[in-house]
Amino acid sequence: MNISVAGLTSSGKTTIFSAFTGTEIKAGTKQAVGIVHVPDTRIDRLAELFKPRKLVYANVDFRDTLPFDTPVKSEQVALSEAIRSSDALVPVIGAYRCSSPEEVLSEMKKIRLDLVINDLDFVLKRIERLEREVRSSQDKALKEKEMELLRKLQPLLENEQFLHGLTFDRQEQGILAPYNLPTLKPLCFVVNHGENQDAAAVHQMVSLLETTLRELGDPSPVLPLNGQLEAEIALLPQEEKESFLKEYGITEPGQNKVIRTIYEMLDLISFFTVGEDECRAWRIIKGATALDAAATIHSDLARGFIRAEVIEYDILLQLGSLQEGKKTGKLRLEGKTYEVKDGDIVHIMFNV
């Protein structure tokens, strides 16, 4: 999963990226990428139980993008491509340099407008192209359906409305999927405040943004983070991090909050495979089946799927082993259509 950390020049987006990834970015570096483990204590507990030779976390790739207000045309193109290839966006607002909630609101509106203009420009150009293609296309009905959909989206974007709160049928989803429109992606706004800013003032900034987003029909969450402080803590040795977080009253690192929030927005859950060789966390969409889980692990498992052995995480910890799960009947057999639950331990039985 790719998450782009974006923002205007001097918003502190690179500092936030450093806080999330624990990496120092050298001057002149553009669009750095950092891999971060998805925080989940369950995989650690499973590792304690099975003592595997290998422990594999689910990962997230954070990308530090170019600034929205870059004047360089080639960088604007690179920024657009980076955002379109992302699964979610974390727009950073430089609250540390703002003297009022209104300034913070203005920066958020500028970011939203940039994303809307990007999509509107794409939609208008695509409509223009379809008008030429539909006359001679063998898939005339499909082209007309696509044009009809885009013409519905056009006035919404012209009215500066985001698209990620809208509902689309299966055919419409298929049409839109290749476009990777930024306003269809989940956003998690980060208010990057300074250490010396008054807590009440930061709260007022966040409240104003949340209220405005609700009025716009935008479900995007807003998280306040002290980017500079968290970036400094992220570079500390692991044994020192917890004490510093506690000293500054930070209950958990900002990256954890952002990843968990985006998981919820994308309806993602985790299931696990366990054993002496390996304990691994897998990411899957809520509502996915045992067959989907098999395909997530390897296409051969899906192709030769026979059945799945499943046990809930909490029950496995209580029993202490898969053998006890079999004896008690808690390790059960499920078919292809079983809906995988968050925290399920899954073993796919297959034959190819």
Image: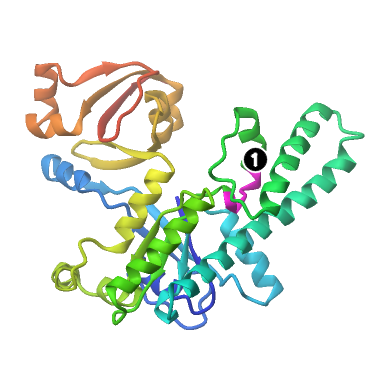
Measuring from the top left, give residue 323's x and y in whole percent.
11, 24
User: Looking at the image, which is closer to me, 189 or 89?
Assistant: 189
Q: Is residue 328 shown left or right of residue 258?
A: left
Span of residues in magenta? 178-183
Write down the quadrant of residue 336 in the picture: top left
Write down the quadrant of residue 317 in the picture: top left
As displayed, is residue 28 above or below residue 291?
below
Q: Is residue 257 magenta?
A: no
Residue type, numbered disc 1: Leu
User: Looking at the image, which is closer to me, 77 or 106?
Assistant: 106
Q: Is residue 133 shown left or right of residue 346?
A: right
Q: Is residue 344 shown left or right of residue 178?
A: left
Secondary structure under tag 1 reads helix
Reading the image, the residue beneath label 1 is: 176
> Magenta region, mostly helix, strand or loop?
helix
Is residue 88 in view?
Answer: no
> Looking at the image, which residue is at 17% across and 41% down?
46
Figure quadrant of the C terminus:
top left
As displayed, is residue 55 above or below residue 193?
above
Measuring from the top left, give residue 286's x and y in whole percent.
39, 33
Tag count: 1
Q: Is residue 324 shown left or right of residue 69?
A: left
> Looking at the image, which residue is at 43% across and 81% down?
97
Write down the quadrant of residue 325 in the picture: top left
> Looking at the image, which residue is at 62% across and 62% down?
113
Outermost residue toward the right in this view: 135
Measuring from the top left, give residue 79's x and y in whole percent.
61, 65
Is residue 149 in view?
Answer: yes
